[in-house]
Amino acid sequence: MKLSKDKIFNYIKRYAILCIGLFLYAFAFNLFMVPNNFVVGGVSGISIILYKFLGLDTSLTVSVLSTFLLIIGFIFCNKDRMYSSVASTFLLPVFIEITSYFTNLITLDISLLLSSIYCSILVGVAVGLVYKVGFSTGGTDILYWIIEKYIKKSTGSLMVMVEGVIIFVGALVFGFQRLMYSLIILFIMSRLSDKLVIGISDSKLLCIIPYKYDAVNEFLNSLSFVKSVRLMTENGKDVIYCVVTSRDYRLVYDGIRKIDKKAFLSVNNTYETKGGYSYE
């Protein structure tokens, strides 16, 4: 099957972004995590602990553990899910090895707090880029999927359990002061990567079940920046959906409440809207 130019371009673009993300992660790993003993979970955290105890090369440890988990994952997990981890499994150790030569030439004279903040920003951007183009970082991500298949727990719960054990071991090895910095990195990193993946919400989705439909509908139609859609439930109830910018949300919300105090209102953050009406 012949691929179109757009598909080829998107394919190259996805892998280019993946490489940028993994390179940033490897750079942050060698520049901040390894020298400062920041264990933030994952196979990278295990590699830092083993480097401290046994002097094992970090890129080699990451490569061996990630490849082992990838093989186990293909045996026990959904194959389609595993394909998202193949590239990262083999590329990340390579980038860790390459960036180690650069970071060895850099000397940073900054506090642990600043190091943890800079590290979290780099790692957050790196992980966000990887996830945004549909890949996984591999490693312990695969472990979550394997356990999830046999233990009915959410991926989030399993992540806390697995990463918690690795971070706790890191605290025992390097001291609980390092634990505090690792938690700072995890907090900022997770928030930043989420924002990169789903974006920053600048609008609100209102779901309205009005008691006074005509009055509420007339009010919404009087606002040029609001375009609403009317639906009807199985039991004949009118439902209105509308998307408004965050700056206009309070005006719309208060207006509906003033007109129809009995109306049911549900408000959600909206990260992306396509098709239909433009509300700007």
Image (cartoon, rainbow, N blue to C red):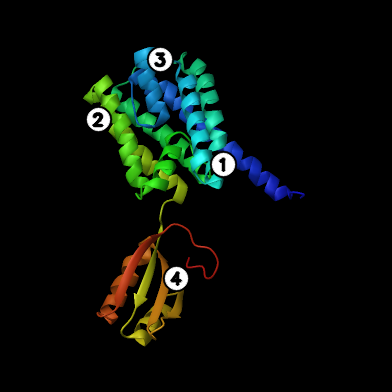
Badge 1 density bin: few <14, some 14–19, many ≥20, Cα 10 Å: some
Q: Marks 4 and 1: CB-CB under 8 Å?
A: no
Give the spatial CA distance, label 2 vs label 1: 35 Å
Mark 4 and mark 3 lie on one chain; the one further toward the N terminus is: 3
Pointer 2 residue: 180
Residue 159 visible here: yes
Q: Work out whether 9 lies above or below 70.
A: below
Residue 32 visible here: no
Taking 238 as reference, is 177 left or right? left
Check disc 2 and give the amino acid type. Answer: Met
**Residue 107's mark?**
3
The label nearer to you, 2 versus 3, is 2
Pointer 4 residue: 225
Check disc 4 and give the amino acid type. Answer: Phe
Residue ID at (27%, 20%):
173
Give the spatial CA distance, label 4 vs label 2: 46 Å
Residue ID at (40%, 14%):
107
**Residue 83's mark?**
1
Q: Marks 2 and 1: CB-CB under 8 Å?
A: no
